[in-house]
Structure formats: structure tokens, C-alpha cells
Image (tube, rainbow, N blue to C red):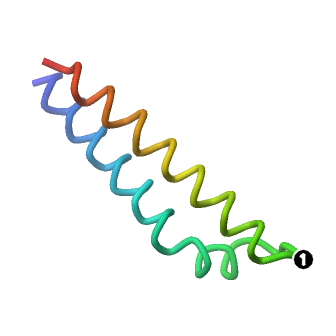
Amino acid sequence: MIQLIGRLICIIVILVGVVCVFDARNLTNKFFSFGDQNEGASGLKILGFIISIISAIILMFIK
């Protein structure tokens, strides 16, 4: 049961990371007031990518 909950949490975190990558420009406009929108969007894309990769690695090792 704990493994199932862990897998579900990892999948949800992966989905959040993927949404950050694909909607980075919209999220930057909505939540942040950066002077340079491109810099904020690229930072959010990098953060989403790292979150997704780390969660996928954790998901691989949950048995």
C-alpha cells in the first residue's frame, strides 16, 4: 500500500514538472513579475525538467 502511494506521488510530481516545462511562459506571466520574461520562462523550464527527471528516477527504484 505504501508503495502504491509512493508511486502515485511520484507520478503527480512528474506531471507537475511536465506542466512547468510546457506552460512555462504562461506560468511566468501569471505568477511572477520578472522584467525579462524569457529568463523566467527558461528558469521554469529547467526547474520542471529537473523535477521530472528526479521523480522518474525515484519512481524506477520504488518496488
Left or right: residue 33 compared with residue 58: right
Q: Where on the picture, by quarter, is residue 22?
A: bottom left
Left or right: residue 62 compared with residue 32: left
Mark 1 falls on what kind of element? Answer: loop
Residue sitting at the far right: 35
Left or right: residue 9 compared with residue 26: left
Residue bearing the label numbered 1? 35
Q: Which residue is drawn at 51% across and 42% down?
A: 50
Q: Where is residue 8 in the image (x, y as percent from the top left)?
A: 21, 41
Q: Where is residue 10 in the image (x, y as percent from the top left)?
A: 30, 38
Going by the numbered disc 1, the residue's amino acid type is Gly
Q: Where is residue 51 in the image (x, y as percent from the top left)?
A: 48, 43
Residue placed most toward the observer, 39 or 5? 39
Classify the position of the C terminus by image quarter: top left
Query: Does 29 sit above or below residue 41?
Result: below
Q: Where on the picture, by quarter, is residue 32?
A: bottom right
